Image (spheres, helix red, strand yellow):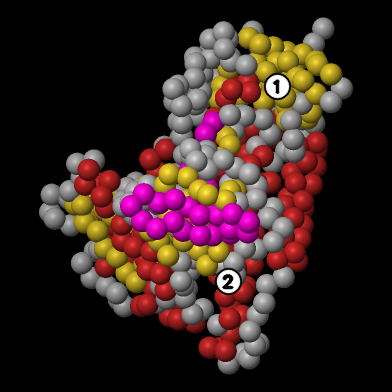
């Protein structure tokens, strides 16, 4: 008799482990099948190590600028080995903590690669051979891997993806970052701040496509000021490795010679490892598992969450999908995730954070809009922390009286905005109006009062803004 569970989760990244944790907290018996370490891409090869290294860059920048504050610290140098050791310490602490929380909830971690066999059966190919588990419900959460492009095979020496960059043993002096999306901009920012000469090569006309143009422009200007070269509208045909450097071939221009090429052109779902052929679980042409509003696949009793499905590839979206899935399994008729209003957070310098419509997307969706933006240059705390690049932009629906009404989007770029987005996210998702939000008090002096000032100005009256 195979082991029986209420829920079998295949994949222990944020989508999978959150399903297991939330399910166990609701009293379900759960098995979590994982071929590597629980925590997945986010904890071991993504969000956590990338943000930890961005913090190294932040500390470096702070020391470089310390004389502005009257603190004479000389010229800092980077000990990359020590930086990587700290990154690993932070990752390992989170990993151990997660493992113990999982075990504390009596979730069975089953090591090995899980394949869905149909009818609630999951075959696990593990270190001690093959076993079969039986679940009343199965949740697929196999995640994603970095995409690559033709002509740039990952060799770990010249061509790297985020997987390799985050465990790089030494710092290059020059690097090309292919793709100016979230991952590309975070790596470009980290490396430039610790002294690497970085060129970002983006196929589209601007970096951070999909981000509000006013916001993306602030990042582009800051990159330029810090010596990061951004080349947009480029087409790359391959690279020619030499002894210590490689030449990136750019159509219509001279090759770019660099020590490392970092490919960050998106991530693809890892559905092929799940053995879905013939099970009835449908996969789209890009490899994403097809799901309905509450993450149900095309087979009854089988759900899919996280990067495996075609929703924003964000750990916290995986968490939200995990909760929806467990509630659906329990028959609680959950509200689907509002994908167009999830919080986005990009941790490059300056940081970017937003929820809801950008000005462009609100207009495209047919809204008559009122938008207001306020710069951090007008904020005392931004001067105090010496980070005045950036702005807060609020987009609201224009009412019949011509006044700003319901808040449709909040977009921020600047110091610690990933920590400030919370009230903007709530405003958008609570469908609050400008008048309602303007009535709330913001502590002074704070960075977050810029959001309050921006909303207040949309009532037609204002204080500082
Ligand atoms: P992305 O889809 O955000 O950006 C990829 C970029 O590469 C785009 O700007 C695209 O135009 C460009 N590109 C594609 N092919 C190209 C080519 N051949 N030559 C030049 N440029 C090319 O993907 P990214 O940055 O790799 O991130 C993957 C996923 O992880 C995304 O969904 C992202 O949102 C998520 N993520 C989110 C983070 C955050 O919110 N802080 C951090 C890291 C990743």
Residue at point 77%, 20% (across, down): 125
Magenta range is 242-269
Q: Which mark is residue 195?
A: 2
Magenta-span inclusion, residue 258: yes
Q: In which quarter of the image is residue 441?
A: bottom left
Q: In this view, does 174 lie above or below 405?
A: below
Circle 2 or circle 1, nearest the eye: 2
Instruction: Give the position of the N terminus as an image quadrant.
Output: top right
Position of 245 compared to 438: left or right?
right
Q: Residue 428 carries which label?
A: none
In this image, 13 relative to 107: left or right? left
Is residue 445 depicted above or below 448 in this figure? Answer: below
**Which percent across, then down, holds residue 8?**
69, 22
Spatial distance from mark 2 to mark 1, Cα to Cα? 43 Å
Q: Can residue 221 be seen in this view?
A: yes
User: Which residue in the structure is indicated by mark 1?
Assistant: 114
């Amino acid at each position: 008799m195979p082991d029986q569970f209420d829920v079998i989760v295949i994949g222990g990244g944020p989508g999978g482990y959150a399903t297991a944790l939330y399910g166990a907290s609701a009293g379900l018996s759960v098995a979590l099948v994982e071929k590597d370490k629980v925590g997945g891409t986010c904890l071991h090869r993504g969000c956590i190590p990338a943000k930890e290294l961005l913090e190294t860059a932040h500390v470096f920048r702070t020391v470089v600028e310390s004389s502005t504050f009257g603190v004479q610290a000389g010229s800092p140098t980077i000990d990359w080995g020590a930086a990587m050791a700290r990154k690993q310490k932070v990752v390992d602490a989170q990993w151990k903590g997660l493992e113990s929380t999982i075990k504390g909830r009596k979730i069975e971690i089953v090591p090995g690669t899980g394949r869905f066999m149909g009818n609630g059966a999951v075959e696990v190919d593990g270190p001690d051979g093959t076993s079969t588990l039986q679940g009343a419900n199965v949740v697929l959460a196999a995640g994603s891997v970095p995409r690559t492009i033709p002509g740039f095979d990952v060799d770990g020496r010249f061509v790297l993806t985020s997987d390799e960059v985050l465990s790089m043993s030494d710092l290059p002096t020059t690097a090309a970052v292919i793709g100016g999306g979230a991952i590309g901009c975070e790596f470009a920012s980290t490396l430039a701040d610790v002294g690497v000469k970085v060129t970002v090569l983006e196929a589209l006309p601007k970096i951070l496509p999909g981000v509000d143009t006013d916001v993306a422009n602030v990042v582009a200007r800051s990159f330029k000021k810090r010596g990061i070269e951004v080349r947009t509208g480029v087409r790359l045909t391959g690279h020619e490795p030499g002894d210590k450097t490689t030449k990136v071939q750019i159509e219509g221009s001279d090759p770019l010679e660099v020590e490392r090429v970092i490919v960050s052109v998106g991530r693809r779902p890892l559905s092929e490892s799940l053995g879905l052929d013939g099970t009835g679980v449908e996969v789209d042409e890009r490899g994403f598992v097809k799901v309905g509003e509450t993450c149900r696949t095309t087979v009854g009793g089988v759900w899919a969450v996280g990067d495996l499905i075609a929703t924003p590839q964000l750990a916290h979206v995986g968490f939200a999908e995990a909760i929806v899935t467990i509630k659906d399994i329990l028959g609680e008729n959950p509200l689907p995730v509002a994908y167009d209003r999830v919080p986005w957070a990009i941790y490059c310098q300056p940081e970017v954070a937003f929820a809801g419509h950008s000005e462009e997307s609100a207009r495209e969706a047919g809204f008559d809009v009122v938008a207001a933006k306020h710069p951090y240059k007008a904020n005392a705390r931004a001067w105090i922390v010496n980070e005045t690049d950036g702005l807060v932009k609020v987009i609201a629906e224009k009412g019949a009286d011509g006044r700003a009404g319901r808040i449709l989007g909040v977009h921020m770029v600047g110091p610690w905005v990933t920590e400030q987005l919370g009230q903007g996210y709530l405003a958008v998702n609570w469908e609050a109006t400008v008048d309602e939000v303007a009535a709330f008090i913001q502590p002074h002096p704070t960075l977050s009062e810029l959001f309050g000032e921006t909303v207040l100005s949309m009532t037609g009256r204002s204080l500082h803004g």
